[in-house]
Amino acid sequence: MVFSLVRRRKSAPSNTTTENVCPYAGTGAGASAPQPPRTPSTTSTTSTTDAGFVDRGEAETFVRRFHGEQPRAGDVEDRVRAVLDEIDRTGTYEHSPAELAFGARVAWRNAARCIGRLYWRSMVVRDLRHVTAADDIAEACFEHLRLAGNGGRIRPVLSVFAPDRPDRPGPRIVNDQLVRYAGHRAADGSWNGDPRGAMLTARARHLGWKRDEEPFQTLPLMVREAPDRRPEWYELPDDAVLEVPLRHPDHAWFAELGLRWYAVPAISDMTLEIGGVRYPAAPFNGWYMGTEIGARNLADTDRYDLLPVVADRLGLDRSSERTLWRDRALVELNVAVLHSYEAEGVTMADHHTESDRFLRHIAQEARLGRTTPADWSWIVPPISGAATSVFHRYYTPPDPTLRPAFLAREAP
């Protein structure tokens, strides 16, 4: 997705939890990267609750950055003293609404694997830290999808639920994305649906969910209020899931394949860390880049594996790789995806335009005196990479210590 931390590399195993959407495909944030250990600051004093639960140095650094970029926010020294005092008393501190929104947007700006960061200031941040019950979290996630879907004009949205605290871990969303298709494996080893959703499908069935096996069957949302609580599952309402039927502008037979994909790639299994405070339930989305669907989700051999089907319908010679039948089928599959989203009025970026916009973002950040960390292997699109403007250049290497950030969450 254009706000995506989703896995794009071809070598990604089929049981990984993130896919091709930027944080944002994102989001979307190396979802497979281990989280760095939390090390108490050497300047921390003993807390009456949990010494070092939130690092004083990380908190102060964030507060000073916030005030440095938001000069009308008030006296920075007063705020630093208040934050450090709160940490000393409770082991953590509470962000103001303005700090939360700023931190969330900067986390997107810092996401080295996201090509869509030009839009980081536009993200809508929903402060839902007061929402803690599983039923209410699920309903808030459904509303997130409605707001983000916006009738097809996709909006970048992030919903922030309660943080981890010394005396109470925050809630977790089990799903890796708010919308994900189920995957069912037959006795003969073949797949019905998306193999990427197989693990979530098994977990949902274990919790009691049962549905007929369909190729594009939306999985329920699973929410865990606390580590010692069993997850609750919820069917996604029809009006919360915007889907696009796929067809080709030149080949009428393409519609006969019955393909579709959802419009809002909302990543929900990453932890948002701001100034040392961690929010383990903070789903976020941008919009898709066409290649994430056409060159990965529908094309990868460990996903829907549709290139042979499309090639045969096109009448291509598959007797040898030298006929480039995969490449030709891949292009037509991507043409269909871009055409379908545009025909339905749903926001989608193409990889050439988004590459140019990313270079604009780098130039804009440079004018403000900031570098733009970028992971080349994620920034370069998975189709026609050498034909895009982001290919023939070097980037500032990713910094795993950069904060605020979207972090991989420990496996349950």
Image (spheres, rainbow, N blue to C red):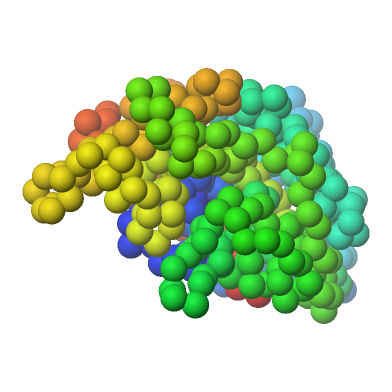
Residue drawn where x is 40% and y is 33% of the image = 253
Return the residue nearer the eye: 136 or 34: 136
Q: Is residue 403 above or below residue 13?
A: above
The image quarter containing residue 65 is top right
Residue drawn at (84%, 53%) of the image = 137
Residue 186 spot, x, y in % from top left: 51, 72
Residue 224 point in image, percent of width and height: 79, 67
| Residue 348 to residue 373: above or below | above
From the viewer's side, name the closer residue of 374 and 23: 23
In the rendered view, tell whether residue 368 sits above or below residue 66: above
Q: Nearer the viewer, residue 289 or 74?
A: 289
Task: Give the side of residue 283 with respect to residue 324, left or right.
Answer: right
Q: Residue at x 74, y 25 (%)?
A: 72
Quadrant location, the C terminus: bottom right
Measuring from the top left, give residue 196's x and y in whole percent. 51, 61
The answer to which image quadrant residue 189 occupies is bottom left
In the foreground, 220 or 20? 220
The vertical placement of 121 against 407, above or below, is above
Image coords of residue 1 (percent x, y): 51, 40
Q: Is residue 24 left or right of residue 393?
A: right
- For image coordinates 68% across by 32% down, the residue present is 149
In the picture, measured across the screen, residue 224 lies left or right of residue 368, that is right
**Number of numbered labels in the structure image:** 0
